[in-house]
Image (tube, grey):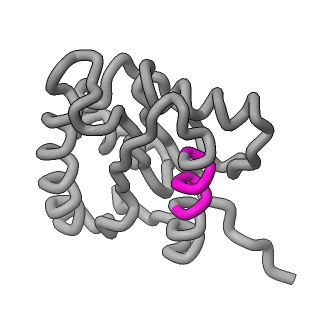
Amino acid sequence: MTEEFEPRIVAFLCNWCSYAGADNAGVARIPSPPNILPVRVMCSGRVAPEMIMRAFRAGADGVLVLGCHIGECHYNSGNHRTAKRIPVLRRLLGYVGIEPERLRLDWVSAAEGGKFAQVTAEFTETIRGLGPLHMGS
């Protein structure tokens, strides 16, 4: 009998919106996957590519970056920086042997507990379909 693969996913959550959205989902008892390891950051714009690569090297099968909706950043333009940075990093992941689908960026506000649960469930299924990440040393 083979055991079903359970992905390990690191989720960088902006303090003001996405982290509060995750909390909202919990308070409302909206089920979300247990595969998510939340990392609270002050702003999605503070999530450097090095942090994402460190998560992959440390054993994450997928990395999720969730921030405030465009135009709602508490630091004015942090999520604009993220919106530019993540697509570039996704294109570069293939060069180090990581499928770009293992990195996802999305926007979740504090009031969107349902969306948090939906995004995390969808991403968990995507990573489950890709299987474990095998990085060379």
The quadrant of the picture occupied by the N terminus is bottom right
Image location (x, y in percent) of residue 135: 39, 61
Residue drawn at point x = 51 percent, y = 60 percent: 123
Looking at the image, residue 64 lies above or below residue 136: above
Is residue 38 rendered to the left or right of residue 58? right
Looking at the image, residue 117 lies above or below residue 37: below
Image location (x, y in percent) of residue 64: 43, 47
Image location (x, y in percent) of residue 92: 15, 60
Range covered by the magenta-colored residues: 116-122
Residue drawn at point x = 76 percent, y = 35 percent: 28
Image location (x, y in percent) of residue 130: 49, 74
Is residue 92 rendered to the left or right of residue 37? left
- Quadrant of residue 17 within the rendered picture: top left
Q: Looking at the image, which is closer to me, 110 or 48?
A: 110
Residue drawn at point x = 54 percent, y = 72 percent: 131
The outermost residue toward the bottom is 1
Is residue 33 rendered to the left or right of residue 8? right
Judge whether residue 120 is colored magenta.
yes
Q: Looking at the image, which is closer to me, 94 or 36?
A: 36
Judge whether residue 56 is colored magenta.
no
